[in-house]
Image (tube, grey):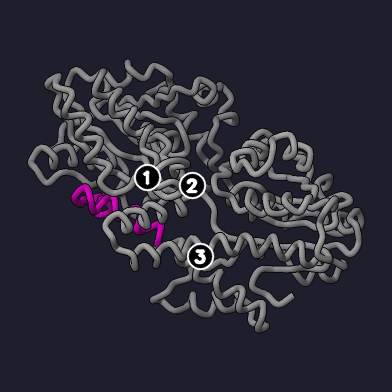
Amino acid sequence: MGKKISKICCIGAGYVGGPTMAVIAQKCPHITVTVVDLNQARIDAWNDPDTNNIPVYEPGLDAVVAEARGRNLFFSTEVDKAIDEAEMIFISVNTPTKTYGTGKGMAADLKYIELCARQIARVAKDDKIVVEKSTLPVRTAEAVKNILQNTGNGVNYQILSNPEFLAEGTAVEDLHAPDRVLIGGDTTPEGQEALESLVEVYANWVPRERILTTNLWSSELSKLTANAFLAQRVSSINALSELCERTGADVSEVARSIGTDSRIGPKFLKSSVGFGGSCFQKDILNLVYIARSYGLKEVADYWEQVIIMNDHQKRRFATNIVKTLYNTVSGKKIAFLGWAFKKDTNDTRESAAIYVADDLLNEQAGISVYDPKVPESQVYSDLDYLETRASEKNKQLVTVVTDPYEACKDAHAIAVLTEWDEFKEYDWIKIFENMKKPAFVFDGRNLLDTNKLKDIGFKVYSIGKEA
């Protein structure tokens, strides 16, 4: 039997920590859940009396927060106090890909995780269960354990790995009814007891048969493997989209045909401008880096190809816009519909839009961006992060607007980069009338009704379909 948990603390109030803790608090009214973060503005946003203003946009999340906040869900910047009082501590901080040093561009940067571990070690006075929630490379738990156990203040720690499998845009559904909850722990009696404590938390609403327990390493590697397999499907269908465009096949029809094979299944076969998001690329690069560090060249090369294909798909989309607009976009206005990496989220991490924009800006295009959920400041910060050109230049060439019709007015071309449903409902006749002719639409998500657009007079390019 695991110890009954009554106080949980989560370090990190981002896309994982916020929603996960809100649902745990909602489903376990007997457990006090405190989410802490050093970012005062972010905590203030989580505490905003108007739940429309919480910092993570996820359908249904505002209602979950409204139900539990102030009852048994708290958001605070008092990190030490929360660590001290909690019996179980989730680490949910950012683990970006390193931008410096050994493993640059591939290995995960674990400095935030290590800082967390050191802070816990400094503050804790009684035994704690520490749960890794952040997406991490295999064997991180070992590093965390070493830091915690060598502080010499007599506190015992159990480390668990509990990777999240949330899809952004459906995170609340995924948390309410997960396919599986995965928990890895030590095979020692103490490890198993800690593991059972976390199983009991989830068992408040998740059927026991959906809670899988493994050893630590299997749990950590399963997370990377799941994302690598999903990303591989996307790159596989995208690789064929290019062949479809040359041969007159239609990638949507090919995907539908193979998707009806029960061994393959229909999910993650939508061809597009490429996958984005904070996890797929990062997790595969981690897998590649781990394989390389063990000298497994063929394994590393195999998985790296999934990323190479994805980068190629984004570059190809941008190149095609330039080529179609008579080999020059200099001084031309290109309207971007969508900046988030997918619909129903305001997350832009690794979004295809950023890279397509960057390529077009290198060709001196002017870009007008409309996204229903992404603020102007985020668009500029995403482009500045690439450090391709001076920040002033990005501001000069890119404008962010709050009206889609304004974004498209006088544009030479429209590029659809996020599959927001509202784009399908627009008055496309009005958009056509206000554009430069010939009016081009590059549908990077195969979202719009191509025939309808062609009837209006647009020249349409869809991924994986012959132009």
For the residue marked with disc 3, what is the amino acid? Answer: Val
Residue 278: mark: 2
Sequence-wise first label, 2 or 1: 1
Q: Residue 356: name its quadrant.
A: bottom right
Give the distance between the C-alpha atoms of the residues marked 3 and 1, in whole angstroms: 20 Å
Number of other residues with Cα within 10 Å of mark 1, as a class: few under 14, some 14 to 19, many 20 or more: many
Percent coordinates x, y for residue 245 in the rendering: 66, 77
Percent coordinates x, y for residue 79 in the rendering: 36, 20
Q: Are marks 2 and 1 in contact (CB under 8 Å)?
A: yes
Instruction: Give the structural element (helix, strand or loop) at label 1.
Output: loop
Q: Is residue 209 magenta?
A: yes
The residue that appears at 40% across and 38% down in the rendered structure is 20
Q: Is residue 391 above or below residue 178?
A: above
Q: Which residue is mark 3?
A: 234
Instruction: Give the structural element (helix, strand or loop) at label 3.
Output: helix
Q: Residue 23: name its quadrant.
A: top left
Q: Which residue is mark 1?
A: 135
Q: Quadrant of the C terminus?
A: bottom right
For the residue marked with disc 2, what is the amino acid? Answer: Ser
Q: Is residue 237 above or below residue 439?
A: below
Q: Residue 176: name its quadrant.
A: top left
